[in-house]
Amino acid sequence: MGHSSSNHLVVIGASAGGIEALRDFVNRLPADFPAPIAIVLHMSPQSPGILSGILTRSGKLPATNARSGERLNPGHVYIAPPDFHLLIEPGRLRLAKGPRENRFRPAIDPLFRSAAQVYGPRAIGVILSGNLDDGSAGLWTIKRMGGIAIVQDPNDALFPAMPENAIRHARVDHVVPLRDIPALLVGLTSAPAVEPATPITAPPDLDVEVRIAGEEDPIKAGVIHMGTPSKFACPECHGVLLEMKEGDRMRFRCHTGHAFSADSLFAEISDGIETALWNAIRSMQEGALLFKTMAEHVNDRHQRGGGAVLAARGDQLLRDAGTLREMVMSAPPFEEPSITGAPSSASPD
């Protein structure tokens, strides 16, 4: 069946529970869906990148890993490959190794921002199941540029935090169960986009963030002018984080380009705390082993019993390490607080 043409672009973001949601989603799309679809699913850099095959088998539309410079065609599903941001340029796709955002590459926000920049009112953003809040800032930008925001009903999502955060942060147009999103998109993409009476001018910060994701030097792109220095260091590179206001929310970006929502910054700091504690335990155990080894050496080579002080210090270090280990093991699971509302899920993203 041939494709009818549409001047829209659909961009979709998903994380935990996303494979199941995307399989169901593409299964309900018609073979003549009139617009291109670009998808970011959070994945590790080592992911085999097999989502395209899963989605091609699950529905009627061809799904492929996006290639840089590839033209956008209606009725085709383009997927961000592992370890690359997927960006939209006029009429085509671009892959980039820009800094990680919200701890991920690919991240949802760069795709959504670039779609908003290029397509304006013709961009349709969709947030599906996932944890934390990647995509909320990008969906807010799509709305800022006159586009349409769709969010999976949190009660319908395997992991509701990402949809909940998007609803709180952006003026969402539609909150619907997953099964109803494909038909909604068919209706939206079949009708002409509603152009605003006054054309919307892209704000300078949108251009800066898209350029950073596209591998431009953040300082040359203008990152320094995007916010005020915060009290916090970037967990990834230890540079000073700039504090940026976005609607009623706060975001952070460092001068090397790493970007964090408040929730993702909490999550990264939490991981750092646990890592630091385990490193302390390891250091104590290594110190104890060294003291005990030296105690045996003293006893063997010199007066017997001369290593008692060293052995005692080693024993104390082992007791301290044991106390710290018990504290780490008995700590309740960290729950990432949501700055704009109720706590989000503590499950890993």
Image (spheres, helix red, strand yellow):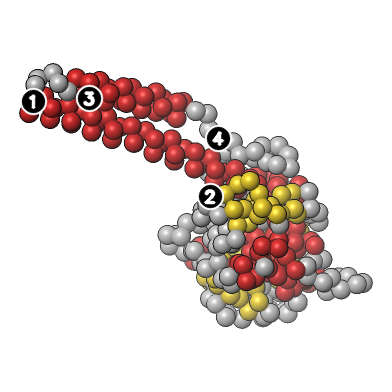
Circle 3 or circle 1, nearest the eye: 1
Q: Mark 3 points at which residue?
A: 310
Give the CA separation, mark 3 to mark 1: 14 Å
Q: Under tag 3, what secondary structure?
A: helix
Question: Which numbered dot is residue 334?
Answer: 4
Instruction: Give the answer, above or below, for where 336 lies relative to 218.
Output: above
Q: Label for residue 235?
A: 2
Could you say which quadrant of the image residue 148 lies in? Answer: bottom right
User: Dot 3 surroundings within 10 Å: few (below 14), some, or many (20 or more)?
Assistant: some
- Label 4 element class: loop
Q: Which amino acid does label 3 sit on?
A: Leu
Q: Which amino acid does label 4 sit on?
A: Phe
Q: What residue type is labelled 2?
A: Pro
Quick one: label 4, few (<14), some, or many (20+) residues within 10 Å? few
> Label 4 near label 2: C-beta < 8 Å?
no
Q: Which residue is drawn at 18% across and 31% down?
A: 293
C-alpha span from label 1 to label 4 = 51 Å
Residue toward you, 141 or 215: 215
Task: Give left or right: position of 348 versus 72.
Answer: left
Mark carried by residue 302: 1
Secondary structure type for disc 1: loop
